[in-house]
Amino acid sequence: MAEKRKNKITSQSITREYKATSQLEAEAASLNWVAALVTAVVVLAGACLNRLIEGTWEQWNIYIIIVTALAANLCFFGIKIANQWERAVVLRLGKFKSLKGPGPFFIIPIIETVVRSVDMRIRSTDFSSESTLTKDTVPVNVDAICFWMVWDAKKAILEVENFYLAIILSAQTALRDIIGTHQLSELLTHREKLGKRLQEILDEKTNPWGITIQSVEIRDIILPKDLEDAMSKEAQAERERHARIILGTAEVEIAEKFAQA
């Protein structure tokens, strides 16, 4: 029950983080210095044109004001910039229009909107599975890390509501399945092999979302304290037994040498 509650809280926090990131990226794509600069130039050009027509700075032509205001708003809200590693998803009247970026691009205000700028770089995500039973019924906590990237921004936005949360939940589910089908000894000795299997499972799951899983690494396997102590004692006993065998062999060899002498 506690684990379910913790997973629920984790999912909620991830969702809030994803939405906050989406909002910040959308705002960053909405306001930029290029748009502000072009808007200022348009306003200045309108003022100079009015000065040439009216011959004074004090009297303004209503048509020039309207045209200048429309052009300024069009530039300020229509000019966007996407960074080298970003692709902006543009909708027109609620339907997918195109992917924009990298660099400056233009949208028609009101009619078109940038719903999100997607980071196309390789990213890393931590995930874990707590108190999961292995095939030989040993409860373990496993920490892992997943390296992934978005290769199709359109699919990542349109095919799944929250691809970041979907990756984490899929990774946690796949990790629990892997743990449940392997014995403890296999988990401890074949981490690289299990990580490769996790990568294949997740890549098959996320590929329809326009996301590829580069690799999965199992970082730590935490055993119950009592089992860890028992294994430590067993290892200590094995080392002592091995030391006694070596000591006994040495004593026999010494005795033989004395006998030969």
Image (cartoon, helix red, strand yellow):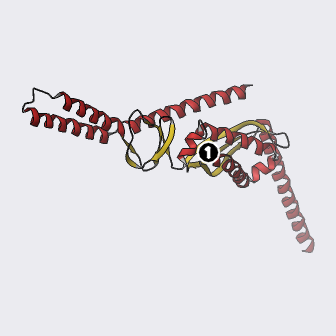
Residue 2 percent location from the top left of the image: 72, 25
Picture layout, residue 62 above or below residue 122: above
Identified by mark 1, the residue type is Trp
Q: In which quarter of the image is the C terminus?
A: bottom right
Could you tell me which residue is drawn at 9 percent across and 32 percent down?
54
Could you tell me which residue is drawn at 24 percent across and 30 percent down?
66
Could you tell me which residue is drawn at 53 percent across and 46 percent down?
153
Residue 222 in sight here? no
Residue 185 percent location from the top left of the image: 80, 49
Could you tell me which secondary element the residue under label 1 belongs to? helix
Q: Which of 250 and 183 is in front in this view?
A: 183
Quadrant of res 42: top left
Residue 40 percent location from the top left of the image: 23, 37
Residue matched to label 1: 209
Could you tell me which residue is drawn at 85 percent across and 64 percent down?
250
Residue 119 percent location from the top left of the image: 49, 45
Q: Quadrant of the N terminus?
A: top right
In this view, the residue farthest toward the front is 63
Quadrant of res 8: top right
Q: In this view, does 50 lie to the left or right of 77?
A: left
Q: In this view, does 17 lie to the left or right of 167?
A: left
Q: Which of 192 and 260 is in front in this view?
A: 192
Q: Is residue 138 left or right of residue 90?
A: right
